[in-house]
Image (spheres, rainbow, N blue to C red):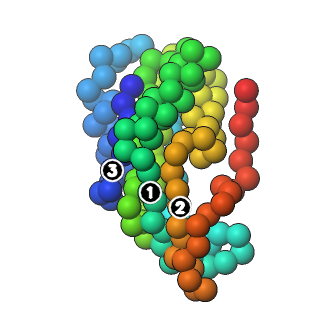
């Protein structure tokens, strides 16, 4: 399992491919479920031009590791990768990439979605959007689905 918090722009599919090449599970997985989330130009009916993502170093990584560990206990997973941006993010840039390796697609897909939703609602990130009317702190994430 790997959790990476970065201020740098990253290429999600290249990072996933690089990590997969480093794994010692070749032939063991039949499924890789991935999710890539990027910065959009609207939220709550308002145009936004970018966002500042803040986190608590150390605490954030540990929390995401717990999310991944919980998913590994619930589903039969071989490995998990989570990369999340912090700092200034502009429209179209990737914010998060999640990849889950498992023997079967159901475990990979269910765990990937669970990790994403838990990350969105539980991980200690703070978002300040840059909107036309000025900066604003995001109080709630967009509606999602958390399957237990």
Closer to the camera in the image, 43 or 112: 43
Mark 3: few/some/many CA within 10 Å (<14, 14-19, 20+): some
The residue identified by callout 3 is 6
Mark 1: few/some/many CA within 10 Å (<14, 14-19, 20+): some
SS state under label 1: strand
Marks 1 and 2 close (CB-CB < 8 Å): yes
Residue 66 position in % (x across, y down): 50, 27
The residue identified by callout 2 is 127
Marks 3 and 2 close (CB-CB < 8 Å): no
Query: Which residue is painted at 28% across and 37% down in the image?
Result: 18
Is residue 54 placed above or below 80 in the rendered structure?
Answer: below
Residue 14 position in % (x across, y down): 32, 46
* Quadrant assignment for the N terminus: top left
The residue identified by callout 1 is 54
Residue 22 position in % (x across, y down): 26, 26
Quarter of the rendering containing residue 129? bottom right
- Nearer the camera: disc 3 or disc 2: 2
Is residue 13 placed above or below 93 in the rendered structure?
Answer: above
Q: Is residue 96 visible?
A: yes
């Amino acid at each position: 399992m790997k959790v990476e918090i970065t201020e740098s722009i990253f290429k999600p599919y290249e990072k996933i491919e690089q990590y997969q090449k480093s794994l010692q599970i070749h032939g063991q997985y039949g499924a890789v479920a991935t999710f890539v989330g990027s910065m959009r130009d609207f939220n709550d009916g308002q145009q936004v031009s970018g966002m500042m993502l803040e986190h608590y170093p150390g605490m954030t990584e540990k929390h995401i590791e717990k999310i991944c560990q919980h998913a590994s206990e619930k589903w039969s997973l071989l490995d998990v990768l989570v990369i999340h941006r912090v700092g200034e993010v502009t429209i179209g840039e990737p914010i998060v990439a999640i990849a889950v390796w498992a023997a079967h697609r159901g475990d990979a897909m269910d765990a990937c979605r669970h990790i994403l939703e838990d990350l969105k609602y539980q991980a200690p990130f703070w978002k300040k959007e840059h909107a036309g009317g000025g900066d604003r702190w995001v109080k709630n994430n967009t509606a999602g689905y958390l399957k237990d």
